[in-house]
Image: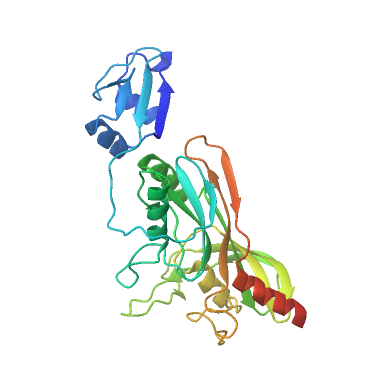
Amino acid sequence: MSTLEEKVDKNFVGRKIREFLKEKMGLSSRLIKGASIDKRILVNNNPVKMNYVLKENDEIVINLAKKESQNITPEKIDLDIVYEDKDIIVINKSPNMVVHPTKRYQSGTLANGLLYYFKESNQDCIVRLVSRLDMDTSGLIIVAKNQYAHSELSNQMQNNNVEKRYLALVHGHFSEKEGTIDLPIYRPEIEGVMARVIDERGQRSITHYKVIESYKDAELVECLLETGRTHQIRVHMKAMGHPIYGDTLYGETDDSGLISRQALHAYKLKFQSPRTKDELALTAKLPADIEKITANLKEAK
């Protein structure tokens, strides 16, 4: 059973438990309300109402587990689990995999595989996505196992406290091997058009880049996102004159014979554990399809 536990110190004696849960434990009003209704907030092993007045050394326990379900069919799928604890699981998503079921993709998604994994490992969890990736982008995705972890990590994401680094294989060579791209990204209001463009009407978008390795007419570039706009790296690489290999939406050449998707990989995440507040730094190596291209480019250099 996943729980949060805390002992009341003298600073909160005489105050209501709701204040303690918010100020000391950092819980959201939504979580507190739901847990209170379900009688999952205990003081000295007894469920209490939110007007309970605290005494010194009261033992508070919040049971994070609750009965939930999703309209997603569990499906046995091989998952590359990079990290897991009682609150989160981080998956290295393979290329060409949709994260969550849609009208077009009802099965074979990461969520289908995760629900099967949770069921087989006797974990009463639903899939709470903290981060997402395009179908054709591979790499690390954070999934929360409970409402508390999802709230904590979502706040980190909103406050730009999650470090997200990608590797992109791009056409051509940068004149400056390290720098910052600060260009606004805008979505044209044209029905059926998915591509974003650089336009002053758009949102400010910042990507820090660094060339990791150079090849013949190509470079492997690390991208650190300061903002998280849709297609940000792909749009910025195109704007710099260096579209990503295999990117059919923003690319300028046909790379279909080399790779079946854009050569973009979310390879590194750094964030705080929602429970311990310790820093977690996780990495995922380049997938086989990008490794194959870089190997060929090295030979051709």
Residue 228 higher or lower than 122, as above or below: below
Q: Quadrant of the N terminus?
A: top left
Task: Kindly tell me whether residue 291 is visible in this rendering.
Answer: yes
Q: Nearer the viewer, residue 6 or 2?
A: 2
Residue at (43, 77) in percent of width and height: 195
| Residue 135 picture quarter | bottom left
Tell me: residue 179, above or below residue 261. Answer: above
Residue 79 spot, x, y in % from top left? 49, 58
* Residue 216: image location, x then y, percent: 73, 81
The residue at 38%/54% (across/down) is 115
Q: Residue 103 is drawn in which quadrant?
A: bottom left
**Color theme of the render:** rainbow
Quadrant of the drawing holding the C terminus = bottom right
In percent of width and height, residue 298 lies at 75, 76
The residue drawn where x is 76% and y is 79% is: 299
At a point 68% along the width and 78% down the height, the residue shown is 218
